[in-house]
């Protein structure tokens, strides 16, 4: 029995006069991987950033509607944005390690919330790095700069940094687009392993990647959700001609 974790209701978004997201109703299911696909400029990343209120940082952004996390509207005036971003972590297109040690990158979220106990920080850092499949590669250099890691390692460390906050949801915005094929394969395998622990929402331009790792797929076009369903069904018997055309490369 799949459980709804996030639900959008009549979600609309503008950047100044540019109407970007058009009255979206959308569901994210718990402990599943949902892929957002569609051509460039269709609103995928904007929708993804709405889920942890990253668009709040853009002054000309205006949002209407609701995003419910376990029934609570994250855009309610009483909602704590820091709490929202703790529960809904994000990993970006390019690895963005802080200019700190590997240890302090992963421990950062706990440290800014006031956790000072070394034993707690040590345990969380190790568990998060293990969950992100990078502990064995870095355990002997935790106190060296995270900037010394390879691109693929940096991205897995960024995933560990998000996991350290014990999020309910992990947002991945084209997390492998800057990586080589070997690192990409490792991130894909990691995502499949992680979905037992955290719900994943991934934006990808790589249609094959969406087919390989996601349970559900959403096809977006020009600010609208054209189609949503189980990935196997969307990829084999799409209901909308535009979905079929995108998947078969007619446009992209």
Image (cartoon, grey):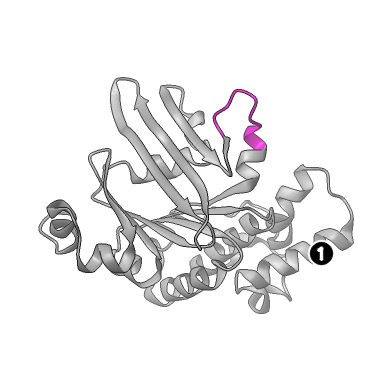
Magenta region: 74-82
- Residue 69 percent across, percent down from the top left: 56, 42
Which is more toward the observer, 182 or 143?
182
- Residue 247 percent across, percent down from the top left: 19, 62
Q: Name the residue at the left extreme.
A: 250
Which is more toward the observer, 137 or 87?
87
Q: Note whether residue 211 is visible.
A: yes
- Residue at image location 40% in from the left, 65% down from the top: 215
Q: Residues within 10 Å of mark 1 (few under 14, many from 20)?
A: few
- Residue 209 percent across, percent down from the top left: 34, 68
Quadrant in which residue 63 is drawn: top left
- Secondary structure of residue under mark 1: helix
The quarter of the rendered structure image containing the C terminus is bottom left
Instruction: Say above or below: 84 vs 169.
Output: above
- Residue at image location 14% in from the left, 61% down from the top: 249
Instruction: Say above or below: 137 vs 60.
Output: below
Q: Note whether residue 142 is visible.
A: no
Which residue position is annotated with label 1?
A: 122
**Magenta region, main secondary structure:** loop
Quadrant in which residue 208 is drawn: bottom left
Which is more toward the observer, 165 or 58?
165
- Residue at image location 42% in from the left, 58% down from the top: 34
Q: Name the residue at the front extreme.
A: 1
Would you say residue 107 sits in the magenta stretch? no
Which is more toward the observer, 92 or 223?
223
Quick check: 196 left or right of 65? Answer: right
């Amino acid at each position: 029995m799949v459980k709804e974790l996030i639900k959008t209701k009549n979600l609309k978004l503008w950047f100044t006069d540019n109407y970007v997201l058009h009255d979206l109703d959308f569901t994210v299911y718990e402990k599943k991987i949902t892929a957002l696909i569609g051509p460039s400029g269709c609103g995928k990343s904007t929708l993804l950033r709405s889920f942890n209120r990253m668009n709040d940082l853009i002054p000309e952004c205006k949002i209407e509607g609701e995003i419910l996390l376990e029934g609570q509207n994250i855009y309610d005036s009483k909602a704590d944005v820091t709490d929202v971003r703790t529960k809904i972590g994000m990993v970006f297109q390019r690895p963005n390690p802080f200019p700190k040690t590997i240890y302090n990158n992963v421990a950062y979220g706990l440290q800014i919330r006031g956790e000072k106990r070394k034993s707690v920080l040590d345990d969380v850092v190790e568990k998060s790095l293990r969950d992100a499949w990078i502990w064995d590669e870095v355990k002997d250099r935790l106190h060296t700069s995270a900037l010394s890691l390879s691109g693929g390692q940096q991205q897995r460390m960024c995933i560990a940094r998000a996991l350290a906050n014990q999020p309910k949801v992990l947002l991945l915005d084209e997390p492998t687009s800057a990586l080589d094929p070997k690192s990409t394969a490792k991130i894909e395998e990691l995502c499949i392993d992680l979905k037992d622990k955290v719900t994943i929402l991934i934006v990808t331009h790589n249609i094959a990647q969406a087919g390989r790792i996601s349970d559900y797929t959403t096809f977006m076009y020009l600010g609208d959700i054209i189609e949503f369903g189980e990935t196997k069904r969307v990829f084999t018997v799409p209901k909308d001609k535009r979905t079929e055309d995108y998947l078969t490369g007619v446009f992209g």
